[in-house]
Image (spheres, rainbow, N blue to C red):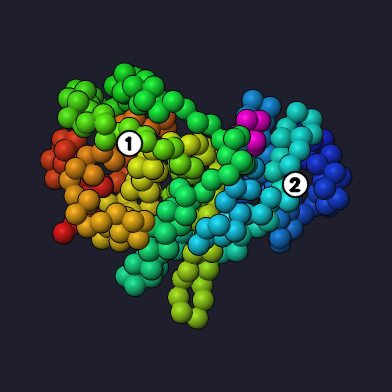
């Protein structure tokens, strides 16, 4: 978690925004400082070395505003004070999916999967001039670079040698043409329970917000489903199947080949940490990457 700016920076920000500093209350989670600013606003701060993330997040939020089935924060203001950038946003109502998930009924989970699948389809269909500020890596170069460094990146995270030795051969069995990017789309890249909020209605829990677009980028659509599979469905094959069908996959496009591609993208992901995932997610039936692909990204019958 990034340290907060000094009291002088916070006081200057509140003066600029005509808000009482006493209304600031920092949220306990998140890699960057984020504050409640009264009941209706959220203030997110970016240290000097992360100002590019401010530009990306503001651009992504403006690009998707009003275009997705799940609400996203309104951009109220952006700027900088004392070297720190800030993004002032409307506050989304609801409770984190991370805390709500155990309380969801099977019907509510099914409905959530459908809405989230349609939301990702709409996100990936988003275009326009505002995407010019979103990073757009050369995808073939990105995949090649991540493939070349996959073992060392996982070794640096403390992954066991038994898993490390499997990575090159596993990646070699996944056709590079299947990881290609014919047309880059807008990716959130970190769709997870922590970044979704739900609200309780008379008919049950419904999604009321998706946030945290700072790591957005343009790239291959299936790269998005790494975080979805790890941090939303988390081994729930039925949920992932319903989400992917709602997104637009045909039943015959689901199965082990897709699961293997998504695990390949997991190993290639810029924030990949297989040791952590193995600790947090359901264990595979066998200690192999093939088994792991089916366990985490399988979609059942």
In front: 29, or 48? 48
Q: Position of residue 155 (x, y in %)?
A: 31, 22
Q: For mark 1, does the 10 Å Cα neighbourhood hold few (<14), some (14 to 19), or many (20 or more) residues?
A: many
Position of residue 5 in the picture relative to residue 172 (left or right): right
Placement of the C terminus among the 4 image quadrants = bottom left
Q: Secondary structure at mark 2?
A: strand
Q: Which residue is mark 1?
A: 266
Q: Position of residue 229 (x, y in %)?
A: 33, 48
Disc sitting over residue 77 in the figure: 2
Q: Magenta span covers which residues?
A: 51-55
**Residue 162 is at least partly visible in this image:** no
Question: Which residue is at a point 19% across and 54% down the rendered structure image?
Answer: 252
Q: Secondary structure at mark 1?
A: helix
Q: Is residue 166 above or below residue 32?
A: above
Question: Which residue is at a point 44% across and 37% down the rendered structure image?
Answer: 184
Q: Is residue 52 magenta?
A: yes
Question: Which residue is at a point 64% across and 36% down the rendered structure image?
Answer: 54
In front: 139, or 279? 139
């Amino acid at each position: 978690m990034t340290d907060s700016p000094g009291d002088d920076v916070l006081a200057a920000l509140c003066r600029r925004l005509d808000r009482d500093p006493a209304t600031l209350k920092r949220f306990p989670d998140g890699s960057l400082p984020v504050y409640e600013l009264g009941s209706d606003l959220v203030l997110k701060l970016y240290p000097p070395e992360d100002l590019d993330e401010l530009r990306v997040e503001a651009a992504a939020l403006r690009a998707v505003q009003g275009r997705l089935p799940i609400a996203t924060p309104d951009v109220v203001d952006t700027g900088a004070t004392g070297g720190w950038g800030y993004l002032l946003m409307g506050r989304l109502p609801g409770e984190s999916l991370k805390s709500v998930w155990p309380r969801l009924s099977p019907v509510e989970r099914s409905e959530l999967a459908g809405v989230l699948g349609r939301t990702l389809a709409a996100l990936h269909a988003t275009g326009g001039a505002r995407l010019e500020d979103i990073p757009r890596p050369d995808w073939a170069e990105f995949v090649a670079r991540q493939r070349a460094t996959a073992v060392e990146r996982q070794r640096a995270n403390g992954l066991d040698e038994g898993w490390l030795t499997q990575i090159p051969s596993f990646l070699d069995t996944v056709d590079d043409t299947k990881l290609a990017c014919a047309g880059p789309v807008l990716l959130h890249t970190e769709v997870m329970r922590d970044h979704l909020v739900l609200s309780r209605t008379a008919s049950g829990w419904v999604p009321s917000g998706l946030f945290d677009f700072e790591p957005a980028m343009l790239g291959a659509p299936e790269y998005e489903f790494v975080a979805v599979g790890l941090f939303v469905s988390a081994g729930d094959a039925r949920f992932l199947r319903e989400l992917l069908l709602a997104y637009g996959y045909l039943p015959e496009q689901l199965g082990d080949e897709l699961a293997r591609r998504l695990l390949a993208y997991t190993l290639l992901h810029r924030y990949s940490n297989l040791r952590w995932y193995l600790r947090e997610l359901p264990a595979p039936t066998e200690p192999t990457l093939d088994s792991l692909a089916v366990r985490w990204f399988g979609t059942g019958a």
